[in-house]
Amino acid sequence: MSSKPASKVVAPLKDELDIVIPTIRNLDFLEMWRPFFEQYHLIIVQDGDPSRKIHVPEGFDYELYNRNDINRILGPKASCISFKDSACRCFGFLVSKKKYIFTIDDDCFVAKDPSGEEINALAQHIHNLLTPATPFFFNTLYDPYREGADFVRGYPFSMREGAPTAVSHGLWLNIPDYDAPTQLVKPRERNTRYVDAVLTIPKGTLFPMCGMNLAFNRELIGAAMYFGLMGDGQPIGRYDDMWAGWCTKVITDHLGLGVKTGLPYIWHSKASNPFVNLKKEYKGIYWQEEIIPFFQSVVLSKESTTVQKSYIELSKLVKEKLGPIDPYFQKLADAMVTWIEAWDELNSAPAAAPAADGAKKDASSSTKKK
Amino acid sequence: MSEVTIKNDEVDIVIGAIQSDLTSFMEAWRPFFSNFHLIVVKDPELKEELKIPGGFNLHVYTKSDIDRVVGSSAGSISFSGYACRYFGYLVSRKKYIISVDDDCVPAKNSSGELIDPVSQHIINLSTPATPFFFNTLYDPYCEGADFVRGYPFSLRTGVECGLSCGLWLNLADFDAPTQALKPTLKNTRYVDAVLTVPARSMLPVSGINIAFNAELVGPALTPAFRLAKEGNLRWETVEDIWTGMCVKVICDHLRLGVKSGIPYVWRQERGNAIESLKKEWEGVKLMEDVVPFFQSLRLSETSVTAEDCVVEIAAAVKERLGSVNPKFVSAAATMVEWMKLWKRVRGQ
């Protein structure tokens, strides 16, 4: 009802995209993102102590969920959502009603490209998601749908329609996403190389998906974006996004969807404590040696025609093949099923789900200011 | 990261001379080529004398050399046009071979510095490749980068790199329809990365700017696939695309890597795409059969060398593509002939 200013940056997909931010400390970083995020709806997932008040800068339209909300909304199914780990962000994916999700960590800031221009990471992710991917044949000039590029000689015309893009995986300048051992050996290394490319990760190839600058088409792949059991009470941490990425890639390959990586860059400001990280990752470093061959060899059946069916099938394979490594994987497989049950429950009917009302009853949510 | 030392005497730079006057070409490359041995092979169809400036360490091979070395087995193997460089591969004795088209000159990177493709190709070939898992920060062995969180440690030693595919600024390697549709499309984007093309993923390898480890994959580069109206413009040929797919299948099978990305060269404008289109779409059409074939090709465990693999691929081509188009039958036959020639000339 309020009047709009004369000129405002058009925000593509502003009514179709939610920005999901897990946080435990504060959201000051949003100030820097204001010009790019202000017109979008935010879903904030507050991890840790629910009695702590998270301050959201004025002018943002948001829903905020803390652990009490998660427990209330999911009931017994809340057991699948991690506590004391940014893996809790996937709760935001669950309750969103939008077609697209962009998720970003609260220590990620606006980066600059080599010409000094501020990078609108969200707009780049949207472009990545709205243009096809090319998983079936590698294009040596990277994303052929970018301005100034195209398919190279030898690229079959029948493959030039590409596949729908399900995931857009962005990168990070400054603090790179290294594991603890690498951080310990190279504490001063910073990523200063701006690689001006977006490319599709070929079908059949796995990759380490980092959750700090990530966007996806929720309708196409959302149900696979479960970030696993991490943090409090779990034997492992810092493998949440990895787990989601391996599951997602297997399923996108199976369903003929694409995953892009590359631009946009954000500026990652905080290096987490490598000793703390090592403790969290320790088991993962050994387990991934078996997890990777498992995912590389997974073949989903023809009957798994949807993301949910594929994910359930995957959970059974996880239980069967990875269960013997550690009881954790049996728990994880069960949690994967719980996640799908929660997903179907919250996302089946077009009518308003209980989650929306629940959020507005709790912590203050400011309305959009013009 | 380990230091990479280029031993100049391990490198041959092979140039296929499609044009007779190589003066400006050689002068442009002088800063980067003068420390290396060059093999210049003159297109046997070229009538004029080659003009090459002095001050280079080079060997020039012409039609008479080709006839002398290859002899009667030249039967199915044609060295005309772009295929002339394969003669250079045949007679080279070096570990690393680098080839650049004679219509390319050094490019500049985003800082405005001239790019030395020779050293970058050598770096690509002598550092490990990582085909089994994708590293989101691209080449983990280059300075300032590493493997990212989630990359399995057992895969961090990588495998040897067999082929390095460079790129092109200005005139990119587009096919004739694309170039005809977008005559002003120039590649101005310098992407500062080299990455390993994952195992079992096929790619179109452009011969405009490549390098390979001849010890590992040399025999796999064969001048096998010629179009009916093969021409002297890249978009009138797909011989390199064919060769590249063979090399990729072989590298995947032998657990070697193929890299793509830097170095860039600057490719000069030449030819008219619309005129080329008037000739034939043959190459473009044939890709529809070629690509699925190579994507599904799996070699047997008994093929343990590049030579074994070439012979096996030739047999598969004849069997599975032979009925589709006679081109494939002759490609298969040429690959077999090439292996015999390779063994004879290289004395293996």
Image (cartoon, rainbow, N blue to C red):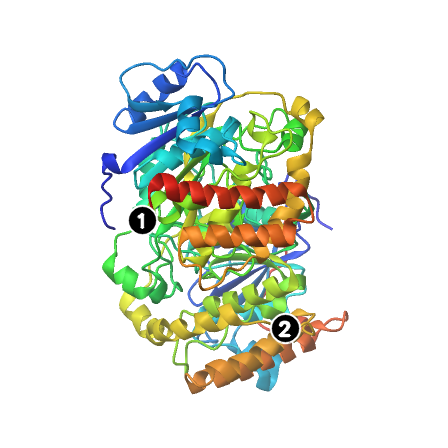
Count neighbours of disc 1 (C-alpha within 10 A) and say few if under 14, some if 14 to 19, many if 20 or more: many
Q: Residue at x 31, y 26 (%)?
A: B33
> Along the horizontal axis of the image, is B242 left or right of B278?
left
- 2 vs 1, front mark: 1
Label at residue A310: 2
Q: Which residue is mark 1?
A: B127
User: Which one is in front, A330 or A254?
Assistant: A254
Q: Residue at x 42, y 65 (%)?
A: A25
Instruction: Point out residue B186 in the picture as x, y percentages from the top left corner.
Output: 55, 28
Kind of residue at disc 1: Thr
Measured Cα–Cα span from mark 2 to mark 1 = 38 Å
Dot 2: what SS? helix
Q: Chain of mark 2?
A: A
User: Which one is in front, B15 or B72?
Assistant: B72
Instruction: Point out residue B222 in the picture as x, y percentages from the top left corner.
Output: 48, 41
In the rendered image of this protein, does residue B165 appear above or below residue A1? Answer: above
Q: Residue B328 appears in which quarter of the rendering?
A: top right
Q: Chain of mark 1?
A: B
> Along the horizontal axis of the image, is A267 left or right of A152?
left
Count neighbours of disc 2 (C-alpha within 10 A) and say few if under 14, some if 14 to 19, many if 20 or more: many
- Does the residue at mark 2 contact the one at mark 1 (Cβ under 8 Å)? no
Residue B259 appears in the rendering:
yes
Q: Residue A73 appears in which quarter of the rendering?
A: bottom right
Q: Residue at x 49, y 65 (%)?
A: A22
User: Which one is in front, B224 or A35?
Assistant: B224
Dot 1: what SS? loop
Instruction: Point out residue A119 in the picture as x, y percentages from the top left corner.
Output: 49, 42
Kind of residue at disc 2: Ser
Q: Residue at x 50, y 48 (%)?
A: B246
